[in-house]
Image: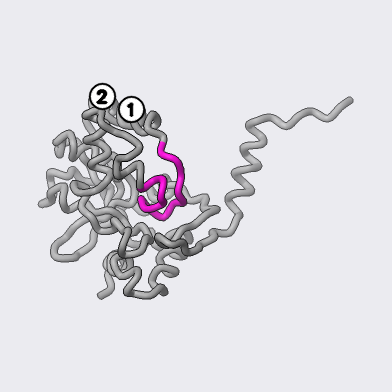
Amino acid sequence: MGMSKPSLKGARRWLQFFRAYLPLIIFKTPVGIKYKFSYFRSEQLSRYIEDEFAFTEAELTFADLLLSPDLLKNDYTLCGQAITTSPHYRLMEEIGAGTLTLKSDYAQRQQTGTLDARQPHPADLTNLSQKYAAQKEKLIQNGIINICAVPVNLHKTQYVILDGKHRAALVAQLHQPHALRISRLSKAFVREAFFHQLYAYTLRQTPSVYSSNQNLIRAIYNES
């Protein structure tokens, strides 16, 4: 008898196992710090949720929802920027208006690696539009959108979004504050190897190049 071919499901399991044990590789590029071989998934943040509250119950505005450390150099970084002035918010506006193109800021940043710590990749406008439509439909059906964020005290209490930047941007763009709920994370999330290694590496870099990210990381750690 010939050997049976491995099933697609089995192959995926082996791939997941293999990727889970690959070391996180961190390296520098002309625009900032990048990584590869991370198997961290946003769902893992759920173990650090301390409580959940409605956005309108807190003394917050959408401008108090900030983009997380992106490990980019000061010349390119979006870290600490309010969601309402972010490329994510403009992405929602452009998709809603039917004006999204490859020349849009969000698409350009994806292609040049200046959106976040992920490596450059082609912008898929169709996929972006489909995700927008799916999230909007979910909002209409459920009336609730959830994000995970950690509090920081800069000039006042604000929240750094660790998971849900696009969802927060959508709710802000649609002017639906009552739909937003925030899962407040404990600062213990930085114990995850993914965050610990990336943040520690960034803090060791030249301040004149990475100070924006370094300052926000220290605020997350509650350090001066």
Q: Is residue 113 magenta?
A: yes
Q: Main secondary structure of the magenta part?
A: loop
Label drawn at residue 141:
2
Q: Residue at x 37, y 60 (%)?
A: 72
Q: Amino acid at mark 1?
A: Ala
Task: State the extent of the magenta-drawn residues as a range.
Answer: 109-123
Label drawn at residue 195:
none
| Picture quadrant where residue 181 is located | top left
Q: Is residue 115 above or below residue 200?
A: above
Point out residue 155 in the picture as x, y percentages from the top left corner: 14, 65
Q: Residue at x 21, y 29 (%)?
A: 97
| Picture quadrant where residue 200 is located | bottom left
Q: Residue furthest front?
A: 103
Say which of marks 2 and 1 sits in front.
Answer: 1
Element carrying mark 2 = helix
Quadrant containing the C terminus is bottom left
Q: Is residue 180 above or below residue 97?
A: below
148 or 174: nearer the eye? Answer: 174
Residue 68 appears in the rendering:
yes
Mark 1 surroundings: few (<14), some (14-19) or many (≥20) residues within 10 A: few
Q: Residue at x 31, y 62 (%)?
A: 75
Point out residue 183 in the picture as x, y percentages from the top left corner: 28, 47
In the drawing, does residue 172 fall left or right of residue 111? left
Quadrant containing the N terminus is top right
Mark 2 surroundings: few (<14), some (14-19) or many (≥20) residues within 10 A: few
Q: Is residue 156 above or below residue 64?
A: below
Q: Which residue is mark 1?
A: 134
Residue 191 appears in the rendering:
no
Point out residue 196 in the picture as x, y percentages from the top left corner: 43, 64
| Picture quadrant where residue 32 is located | bottom left
174 or 43: nearer the eye? Answer: 174
